[in-house]
């Protein structure tokens, strides 16, 4: 049972992520286009180096998308899959993005599954994995290094994360080698991740 009809916050405007608590002009709202003509709503929350901030004009740029390549090249990225119900703009998810991004100095890619928020299509078990794969491929298409991507999920997203990680592991994908070290910091930030990092 998917709770995709529970679209909290109601009537969200994903083009204005700062309305929900994210920093002004540091989140790129866009759609990931899938091979079956469906689209996934997504946010790429940038983490930029100090040199970029120092070179900016007084006001941040209106379009953060021009800095995505730099952010991917200079910082790790968390590919985050949320739980059942609500959207990527739900308040506790915003708090998590800010906490993880700040503590790990990481970018965040957060998506809404098919028929969650403004994403098209219908949710299904197989479809969730296709959604995850599409998000992974988008990061690689932006020249992200696979070893700099951490796959993370919560509730429903844990299954999605595990299935994607299993696929990548079966392909001997190198990105899975660094997950343990990247998860070291969240164990101090978020209690749900403690079980993942025990020796």
Image (cartoon, grey):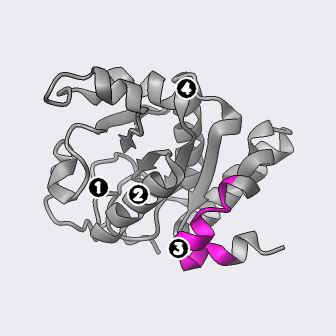
Q: CA distance from mark 4 to mark 3?
A: 26 Å
- Secondary structure of the residue carrying tag 1 is loop
Q: CA distance from mark 1 to mark 2?
A: 18 Å
Of tags 1 and 4, the one toward the viewer is: 4
Q: Are marks 3 and 1 in contact (CB under 8 Å)?
A: no
Q: CA distance from mark 3 to mark 1?
A: 25 Å
| Position in image of residue 169 (x %, y %) | 82, 46
Residue occupying image coordinates x 70% and y 56%: 163
Location of residue 30 by image quarter: top left
Q: Is residue 188 magenta?
A: yes
Tell me if mark 2 has few (under 14), some (14-19) or many (20+) residues whose alpha carbon lies within 10 angstroms of its own: many
Q: Tell me: 33 left or right of 191.
A: left
Residue that numbered label 1 is attached to: 117
Q: CA distance from mark 2 to mark 3?
A: 11 Å
Q: Is residue 140 above or below residue 39?
A: above
Residue that numbered label 3 is attached to: 190
Identify the mark nearer the N-term, 1 or 2.
Answer: 2
Residue that numbered label 4 is attached to: 73
Residue that numbered label 2 is attached to: 97
């Amino acid at each position: 049972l998917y709770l995709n009809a529970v679209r909290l916050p109601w009537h969200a405007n994903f083009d204005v992520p700062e309305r929900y608590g994210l920093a002004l002009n540091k989140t790129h709202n866009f759609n990931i286009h899938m091979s079956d003509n469906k689209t996934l709503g997504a946010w790429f929350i940038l983490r930029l180096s100090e040199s970029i901030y120092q070179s900016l004009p007084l006001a941040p740029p209106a379009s953060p998308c021009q800095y995505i390549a730099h952010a991917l090249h200079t910082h790790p990225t968390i590919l985050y899959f949320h739980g059942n119900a609500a959207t990527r703009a739900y308040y506790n998810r915003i708090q998590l993005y800010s906490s993880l991004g700040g503590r790990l100095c990481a970018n965040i890619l957060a998506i809404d599954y098919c028929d969650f928020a403004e994403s098209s299509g219908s949710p299904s078990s197989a479809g969730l994995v296709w959604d995850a794969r599409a998000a992974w491929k988008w990061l690689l298409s932006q020249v992200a290094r696979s070893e700099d991507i951490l796959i993370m999920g919560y509730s429903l997203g844990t299954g999605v994360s595990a299935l994607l990680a299993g696929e990548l592991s079966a392909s001997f994908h190198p990105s899975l080698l660094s997950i343990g070290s990247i998860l070291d910091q969240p164990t101090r930030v978020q209690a749900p991740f403690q079980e993942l990092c025990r020796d």
